[in-house]
Amino acid sequence: MIESIEVTDLVLSGLVAFGILQLTWFSVMILRRGMPPQTIQQSIPPLLAIWVLMWPVYTDTRWLAAGIIMLAVMGLLAMTVRKPFWQQLRFAWSRQTENSNPVIYPTLKLLPLTHLIASLLIAGLWFQAIPEFGFGLALCMCLAFPAAFWVDQLCEIRFGFLKLGFPAHPEQTLAGHLALIVVSTVLLCWSLHVYHGTDWQTLFIATLIAGMTASATRAVIPGEWNTPAAMITVGFVMWLL
């Protein structure tokens, strides 16, 4: 039994490592074809949702750290290796200003994808403590927050008047926050239903409050720190409810 458990977790970790290597390569390739770094970064979490969906399969949840460490190692290599590939990866995975030049790579203090790695780590800790919460939070991080970003981008192009004008995030829109609430509510409901088989109607109020908490956190926490902050606040709201 012990050997089968170890093989299962090793195989899953190997698949995750291979997927992250592919993600690294694709990030550089599409950057070279002109895709903006912000677009690349917002495309990464939905791809990681494939890994998150495998979390309940792990027999030892400590193996989740292998995938998080792999992402951190790729970011560390991007910061330290002075080769064109790794420097381009650093540019693709780091927060840039509007005047950033892809030819002159800026000196960045934070590890690339710091906010994503922090969010995964917090969701993973929740998963070890309360699996149904951590699973739902990780899915929200991978799907709900990117959905809100893309809705904001669509509204900015077509309906500029929908912007809410938050001081920390003037680009956020009403439609984006509604999308975050709806998607978060559905994902948290589904996570609780998967683990407990609870009827969705009985979960709706609690998960709706949690989704509204995620939206409020996104509105008031500056920069990309709103995502890891939401993993903390939404987790505690779910725990209290």
Image (cartoon, rainbow, N blue to C red):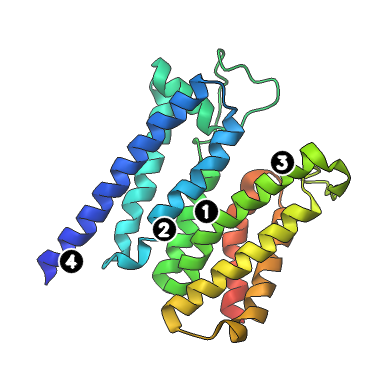
- 65 vs 150, nearest the viewer: 150
Q: Amino acid at mark 1?
A: Cys
Callouts 4 and 2 close, C-beta under 8 Å: no
Q: Amino acid at mark 3?
A: Gln
Q: Amino acid at mark 2?
A: Val
**Closer to the camera: disc 4 or disc 2?**
2
Q: Secondary structure at mark 4?
A: helix
Q: Residues within 10 Å of mark 3 (few under 14, many from 20)?
A: some
Q: CA distance from mark 1 to mark 3?
A: 17 Å
Q: Secondary structure at mark 1?
A: helix
* Position of the C terminus by quadrant: bottom right
Q: Residues within 10 Å of mark 1 (few under 14, many from 20)?
A: many
Q: CA distance from mark 3 to mark 4?
A: 44 Å
Q: Which residue is mark 4?
A: 5
Lower position in the chain sequence, tag 1 or tag 2: 2
Q: Residue at x 59, y 75 (%)?
A: 238
**Closer to the camera: disc 3 or disc 2?**
3
- Vertical placement of residue 34 versus 201, above or below: above
Give the label on residue 142, or none.
1
Lower position in the chain sequence, tag 1 or tag 3: 1
Lower position in the chain sequence, tag 3 or tag 4: 4
Q: Is 2 on the left-hand or right-hand side of 23? A: left
